[in-house]
Amino acid sequence: MPQQLLDWSRAGPRRMLSGFRSAIDLHLEDILPAVSAELIIIHAEFDPLTTYAYAARLAADHHGRLLVAPGGSHSWPINDPDGFRRLLDELTR
C-alpha cells in the first residue's frame, strides 16, 4: 500500500480519477471473448478488491487458466518480483 500511495501521489488527482473510472468502466467479461491468445488469470491470494470466485469464473468462462499468487494482495507483484518470477516459471511447466 505505501508504494501505491507514492505512485498515486505522483500521478495526481486527474490521472487517479481517470484510472479508477477506467477500472470501473472496463468489463473484462465483454472483452475476453475477442482474445484469441491463451488466457491466464492471475489472482492474488489476499486480494480485497477482486474475489477468487470472480477470477475463477473469468478463467472458466473463457477457457483460461487460473493461477493464484500466494500471499499476494491486489497490487501484487509490485513488491514481490521473486514471487512473480516463480509464478511465471510455473507457466512454462
Image: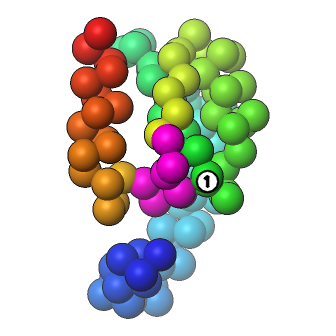
Q: Is residue 74 magenta?
A: yes
| Residue 4 to residue 44: above or below | below
Q: Nearer the viewer, residue 22 or 51?
A: 51
Q: Position of residue 40 (x, y in %)?
A: 45, 24
Q: Which residues are magenta?
A: 70-76
Q: Is residue 15 visible?
A: no
Q: Which residue is denoted by mark 1 in the rendering?
A: 47
Q: Position of residue 82 (x, y in %)?
A: 24, 46
Q: Position of residue 55 (x, y in %)?
A: 64, 34
Q: Position of residue 79 (x, y in %)?
A: 32, 62
Q: Residues within 10 Å of mark 1 (few under 14, many from 20)?
A: some
| Residue 75 to residue 15: above or below | above
Residue at coordinates 54% horizontally, 23% vertically from top-left?
Answer: 66
Q: Nearer the viewer, residue 91 or 61?
A: 91
Question: Main SS type for the magenta part?
Answer: loop
Residue at coordinates 41% horizontally, 75% vertically from top-left?
Answer: 4
As helix, strand or loop, the secondary structure at mark 1 comes to loop
Left or right of 80, for residue 5 = right
- Colour scheme of the rendered structure: rainbow
| Residue 37 to residue 75: above or below | above
- Residue type at mark 1: give it: Asp
Q: How many marks?
A: 1
Residue at coordinates 48% horizontally, 68% vertically from top-left?
Answer: 19
Q: Quadrant of residue 93?
A: top left
Residue at coordinates 33% horizontally, 60% vertically from top-left?
Answer: 78
Q: Is residue 27 visible?
A: yes
| Residue 33 to residue 87: above or below | above
